[in-house]
Structure formats: C-alpha cells, structure tokens
Image (cartoon, rainbow, N blue to C red):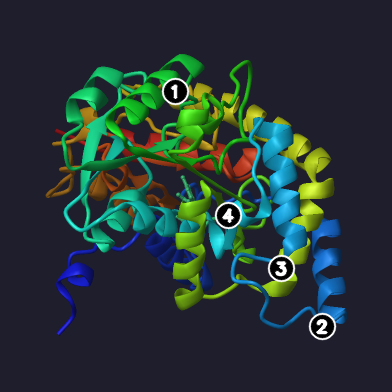
Amino acid sequence: MISKIVGNITPSATCELEGIIGSMKKDGIDVVALNIGEPDFKTPEAICTACKKALDERKTTYVATAGVPELRQAICHKLLCDNGLSYTTDQICVSTGAKQALFNAVMAVTNPGDEVIIPTPGWVSYVEMVKLVGGIPVCVPCRSDFQLDIEAIIAAVTDKTAAIIINSPNNPTGAVYGLESLKRVAELAVEKDLYVIADDIYEKLIYGEKQHYSIAAISPEIYERTIVINGMSKAYRMTGWRIGYSASPKSIAAGINGMQGHMTSNSTTFVQWSAIEALRNGEAEVKQMVEEFSKRRDYAYERILQLPHVQCTKPDGAFYLLPDLSWYYGKKVGDKVIRDSFDLSEYLLSEYHVAVIPGDAFMAPGTIRIAYTNSMAEIGRGIDRIATALAALSD
Ligand code: PMP
Ligand code: GLU
C-alpha cells in the first residue's frame, strides 16, 4: 500500500496540465497555451554550444554532489554582484532544478510536526513539499494587493514554526516585495528563531520601477537564517536543463549536500558547464527577453481588464496574471454549473481550447492563472477565447 505521506500528496497542477495539453496538441487540437511558467524563447545559442563542448570533452562523469567548483564559483560571483551576498563555494549546492533545491531546503529545516508559513497565493509545490517532509503547511493570505500581510504572518507564528517561504517576484501573483516588508520578515525570523527560504527564481523578471531585494542581505543575523534558492530555468530559458541551486549557512549547506548525495548525487555534469556560460555571459539575452515580457504584461493586463466583471492587480514581475473571475461562479453552461476555478479552467480548456491554471492550485480560489509566456498573437487569441467563453455562461 502507498505510504500515508505520498497518499496525501496532491499532484502538481502545473505539471499535470502540461501533459494533458501535450496530448491534445498531438491529436491536432489547436490549444492556446497560457498555462505553463516557462519562457517560450529558445535557450540561447552560446549556452547550447557550451553544453556540446562539455559533451565533446566527455564531461560526463560523476562530479562533486554540490556541483563542479567552477559553477559554484560562478554562482558565488553572481550572488555577490547581483545580491550583495558573500558566499564561499562550500555554501552552494547545485541541484536538479530550483525545485530540488527548494525541497532540499524544506527538508533541511523542518522536523516532523513543524509548521512552515507559506504566504498565499503561492506556488503549487510549496505546500506539498512541506507535507512530504512531515511538516505542516500554514497558509497565510496576502493583502488584496498581493503584498505580504506582515501582521497576519506574525500572528501565524507559533512555537512549532520552523520556517517561512518567501517568493518574490511571486508565482502566481507577480508581486514584488518591498524592502520594508522584507525587513519586517527578517526581524521576525531573527526574533523567533525561524529560517527563511527565499525563492528568488523570478529575480530577473521585473518590469518597471520595482527592484528585487534579497532578504539574506538585510543583516548578518538574517543571512545566518536564510536559504537562498535560485536557478537557471526562468532567466536563461533553461527549464528542461534542470539546474537550480541553494546558498545557505555552512551547517545547512553541509546537511543539504549530505542529503542530496543520497538522493540524486550531482545534477547532470555537462549541463553544469552550460550554466557557467549562462551566468558568465547571459545577461544581454535576459535583458532582451525581459523587454518582451514587459510588453506582453502590459498587453495581457489591458486585455484582461476589459473582460466584464473581472478584477486584476497589475503584476510587477514573473510572467503571470491572476485575474479574479469569481463573479462567474454559479453560472451555467448547459446544465453544468461552474462552481469554482477547477470547473472554469476545465470549461475553458475543453470547450474553448485555452489552457490556464485554476487559482485553487495556488490557494487563490476566485482566480485563474494566465501565463504570458506565449507570443503576443497567442495571448490575444487566448484572451479572445476566454472572453467568448465567459460571454457564453448563463444564469
Ligand atoms: N519556484 C517557483 C516559484 C517556480 O515557479 C518554479 C517553476 N519552475 C520553481 C521554483 C522551480 O523551478 P525549476 O524549473 O528550476 O525547478
Ligand atoms: N513553475 C512553473 C509553473 O508554475 C512550471 C511548472 C512547475 O514547476 O510547477 O508553471
């Protein structure tokens, strides 16, 4: 029989849907994909070339579990230059995607029965990761503008709280947290002896004036209590390459490294060399991509605002919109009542072939998540379909 822990896991809505859409497309269905958090831009040529070179040089053996020293050095350099954070290579662990780095982090600081605070809306996998290690996820809703509700976070801390997960820019809201609120989280963590897991994966995807702050850089005390998570997937269009990393205090890093040595060992060796290329020389292409995402954000946001009875907060980062469509709950298509975001997303996909993620998967029940990780034309076509689908619902 399957274990209680695994039996209690909800599969990832984002990953599952990607499989379903793949089969629909294979069957010749013209699906407009606004579901997945993956840049539609191709991995830059130089990164691919570095990978081919590493293969030609047969960089295909096991290496140190935490990653080749050259990559860990490149990561230390990035953290210093971009984030003002000083780490040595023994504090870095390169993992199979930021997802594994996050799981390692949760595992490293959570004892069975410990509570982990997750501001919501929040990414699908945080709650499940906490459950997987025997912890208790404590979801704390953000304010209506999707900024952290610090008072609610303070109120949620108990003597069982082990950690808080902070994700800015945020998936799915696109919110970028200001320095003041991060300072308050840092003060709380230091005062109550909590760890902070700072998921910075969307750090470079910010549009407009806002700036990314790394909570670990706020004070030496919070540096000692933070595990920084980042990776190559979003900024360098390397989703399928599976490279992420953590940077943490030495004792935590040693624990993560020891644990990963029993799980996956090192992440794919020749891919690590492409990550070095990306970190050393990839910024120009990141900048170009961010300019394009910024235009798409504006376009998608304006279009969504025109949909009747739909509310939407303008995101400052990542590549998602989280419109509230709850006005349509209780409406019908034929005999079927649209009860919630699952029904609505299912209706949009099955009847109008437009793929979005139900907000319930992010603990944002009134919403759907729209990823603008597709061309402007496809975003337009997708929102046209959503408009038609909403207009077809009746009382
Ligand atoms: N954190 C967040 C908030 C994400 O949206 C994702 C999605 N990929 C990840 C972590 C994991 O990224 P990776 O592809 O590097 O595993
Ligand atoms: N993070 C992306 C998303 O939210 C990719 C899928 C996943 O890893 O969850 O769509």
Residue on which the image places disc 4: 245
Precedes in sequence: disc 1 or disc 3: 1
Precedes in sequence: disc 4 or disc 3: 4
Which quarter of the figure is the N terminus placed in?
A: bottom left
Which class describes the residues within 10 Å of circle 3: few (<14), some (14-19), or many (20+)? many
Of helix, strand and loop, which one carries label 1? helix
The amino acid type of the residue labelled 2 equals: Arg
Which class describes the residues within 10 Å of circle 1: few (<14), some (14-19), or many (20+)? many
Vertical side of 162 occupied by 46: above or below: below
Q: Nearer the viewer, residue 31 or 225?
A: 225
Which class describes the residues within 10 Å of circle 2: few (<14), some (14-19), or many (20+)? few
Vertical side of 347 occupied by 304: above or below: above
Precedes in sequence: disc 2 or disc 3: 2
Left or right: 202 in relation to 142:
right
The amino acid type of the residue labelled 3 equals: Val
Mark linked to residue 182: 1
Alpha carbons under labels 4 and 3: distance apart: 13 Å
Of helix, strand and loop, which one carries label 3? helix
Q: Nearer the viewer, residue 90 or 27?
A: 90
- Asked if ligand 1 lies within 8 A of label 4, the reply is no
The amino acid type of the residue labelled 1 equals: Leu
Of helix, strand and loop, which one carries label 2? loop
How many circles with numbers are drawn on the protein?
Answer: 4
Please tell me in which quadrant of the rendered image residue 67 appears.
Answer: bottom right
